[in-house]
DNA sequence: ACTATTTTTTAGACTAACCTAAAAATATAC
DNA sequence: GTATATTTTTAGGTTAGTCTAAAAAATAGT
């Protein structure tokens, strides 16, 4: 049994560790949780006592396999609720993250299975992020931020970062949605801004934007 | 801004005061909240500081008009979520109360308006309880517990008490649902058990059951 | 290798929500 | 109207989660 706060810490650790593949440092977690390092140290002791992370003093924390599956369940709930809000209630994709941050903590296995069924077992959420199944299994497709690719790249938008509402509104305006074709036409060395083709439509974007567009090769 | 715990206390006060029409005593509230009188005294000081109740030492609390509208919003959310769970997700009516106790604390005015629209602006929840509208207005139809009526009474089931899952399963089995015709055929003085007609179907029920069936005249 | 800087942990304190035990106020009984 | 019983409040303490300031460990610079 994790408290709401513990669930939020665990989820942040899971994301910062890239799905459990590397250690997370105290300050990085403090930054992500908008709190102080001292509070983080307190919390990681608790999470470590509950065996969802391992903790080596001064060297950061690692997620255990128990921790991974608990984090994935919270992520599953978050993404299913986002899908519900967009597909069924008509929310825009920039309006759902904050509400899903609350809904992801509702504790009812039956509710989440019924919701999944009601939504038709969606594979990705409105931002293109994969939804873990009821066993916590998640299809990881390697996603590359657009700013790391060169002129001539051609592919499809897989997902976009979902926590900044203004970014999402802008991406929506230029038509940058998951599944849409994309091509890099030009790249400026000085500021890494780009000229791209989105669904056969020319757009100039800064690095601040290209960083948040994730594509598949 | 009320905390989750404060919302639960306020809702309990609202119900115990019959919608704000009488004072609520400390012990009654402690009983309802499954807590101790000392904890209640602490909490009512906080609620009183937030001006959702008035508090006179040793004489109980009363809900203010601000408190009433806040309580009604929580009740609105509770009943809309119950309706969602039954109508859209296929829950049975005895399975929804506990989940709605969690969902009623999700804070997003837009969510609740969209949900109301999605459900087609329902007037009552699955148990027959009226759903306050977005302004907190609620249609109060005087409801009488069946055990308070005499032989010969004839009318319609308005609502049933919703927090006991076993009661609801039983009521469902005998066909006692909101909207169904009901008639009292006989009543035993000794234990106040009854023979009734539910939708032209004869059933014997104890007082424990008839207390929880609410009818309109 | 030693000092300076950065990172992390510890120490001590605060608030919300809860508890038990004791004191105070109110209600009841004769 | 005084004594007893009941109800409510106060006093003091606990846990979860947070904070600031100080101490300790690790890292970097020369
Ligand atoms: Mn999100
Ligand atoms: Mn998302
Ligand atoms: Mn209910
Ligand atoms: Mn109900």
Image: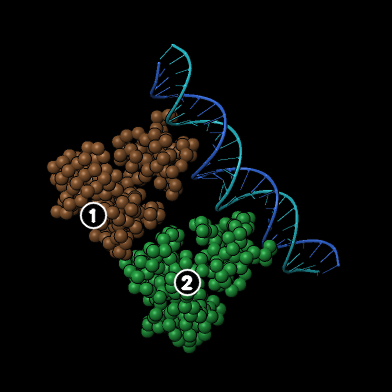
Chain colours: A brown, B green, C cyan, D blue
Q: Chain of mark 1?
A: A
Instruction: Work out whether disc 2 and disc 1 sit on a shared chain.
Output: no
Q: Which residue is mark 1?
A: A174
Task: Identify the residue at horizontal 18%, vertical 48% (top origin).
Answer: A196
- Indicate the quadrant where residue A59 lies: top left
Task: Identify the residue at horizontal 33%, vertical 38% (top origin).
Answer: A17
Residue A88 is situated, as x and y percent measured from the top left of the image, at: 29, 64
> Label 1 near label 2: C-beta < 8 Å?
no
Q: Which mark is residue B109?
A: none
User: How many angstroms separate mark 2 from mark 1 (CA)?
Assistant: 41 Å
Look at discs 2 and 1 and give the one toward the viewer.
Answer: 1
Q: Which residue is mark 2?
A: B136
Mark 1 surroundings within 10 Å by alpha-carbon count, few (fewer than 14), some (14 through 19), many (20 or more): some
Visible in this render: residue B73? yes
Element type at mark 1:
loop
Task: Identify the residue at horizontal 22%, vertical 53% (top origin).
Answer: A176
Mark 2 surroundings within 10 Å by alpha-carbon count, few (fewer than 14), some (14 through 19), many (20 or more): some
């Amino acid at each position: 049994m994790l408290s709401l706060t513990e669930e939020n810490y665990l989820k942040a650790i899971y994301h910062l560790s890239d799905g459990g593949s590397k250690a997370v440092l105290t300050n990085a977690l403090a930054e992500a949780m908008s709190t102080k390092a001292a509070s983080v140290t307190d919390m990681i002791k608790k999470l470590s006592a509950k065996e969802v992370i391992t903790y080596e003093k001064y060297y950061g924390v690692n997620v255990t396999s128990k921790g991974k599956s608990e984090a994935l369940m919270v992520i599953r709930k978050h993404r299913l609720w986002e899908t519900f809000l967009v597909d069924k209630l008509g929310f825009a994709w920039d309006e759902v993250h904050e509400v899903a941050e609350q809904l992801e903590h509702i504790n009812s296995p039956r509710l989440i299975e019924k919701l999944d069924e009601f939504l038709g077992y969606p594979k990705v959420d409105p931002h293109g992020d994969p939804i873990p199944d009821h066993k916590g299994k998640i299809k990881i497709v390697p996603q590359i931020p657009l700013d790391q690719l060169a002129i001539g790249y051609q592919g499809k938008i897989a997902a976009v970062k979902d926590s900044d509402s203004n970014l999402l509104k802008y991406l929506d305006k230029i038509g940058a949605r998951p599944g849409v074709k994309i091509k890099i036409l030009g790249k400026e060395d000085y500021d890494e801004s780009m000229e791209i083709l989105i669904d056969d439509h020319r757009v100039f974007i800064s690095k601040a934007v290209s960083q948040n567009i994730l594509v598949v090769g």
